Amino acid sequence: MTAKLNPFTAAPQLMKSWMSVSTQVADSLERSLVELVKIRASQINACANCINMHTQEARAQGETEQRIYLLSAWREAPCYSERERAALGWTEALTRLSQTQAHDSDAYHALQTHFSQEEQVKLTLMINVINGWNRLAVGFGLWVEPQAAQAVRAAA
């Protein structure tokens, strides 16, 4: 990790808790959907660290190159399910919250159609988690290789 500040050494207990919450939230939905959400939010936030990490993790879980490459243009690409489209739309609405008025949007209506109320909360928490990681990584100039991140998660 090369960073302006290493949050794991600056606030180890809080970062351990943050890592634990992050893992719990990620484990609450299907892995393929979670990785798509993480990648899309990271693209919007221009977080190279998280794009690098989550595209590698998606590939390791069997995600196709086509779906990874087309993610920034998911609306025009036919390779995503309606559930994935609803999740990606909600991801964009929340990641761009100041611009979207998410609670009164088409994205919210699609979310209600394809996700139970419990899943809506889980997905919203997942979007919050990745946006938080994006802000930590971009703000502090973090770069963590995916293998190192796996070791940190395992230790948490």
Image (cartoon, rainbow, N blue to C red):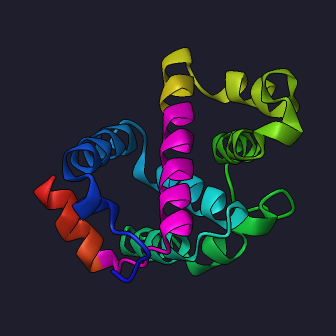
Boundaries of the magenta span: 123-146
Image point (47%, 30%), residue name: 122
Up/down of 41 relative to 127, above or below: below
Residue 17 falls within the magenta-colored stretch: no
Up/down of 1 relative to 38, above or below: below
Observer-nearest of 59 and 143:
143
> Where on the picture, by quarter, is residue 120?
top right
Q: Left or right: 11 with respect to 132?
A: left
Residue 88 rendering spot, x and y as whole percentages: 69, 48
Residue 103 rendering spot, x and y as whole percentages: 78, 22
Residue 108 rendering spot, x and y as whole percentages: 76, 27
> Where on the picture, by quarter, is residue 9?
bottom left
Residue 4 rendering spot, x and y as whole percentages: 44, 75
Image point (52%, 24%), residue name: 121
Q: Left or right: 150 with respect to 66?
A: left
Observer-nearest of 130 and 115:
130
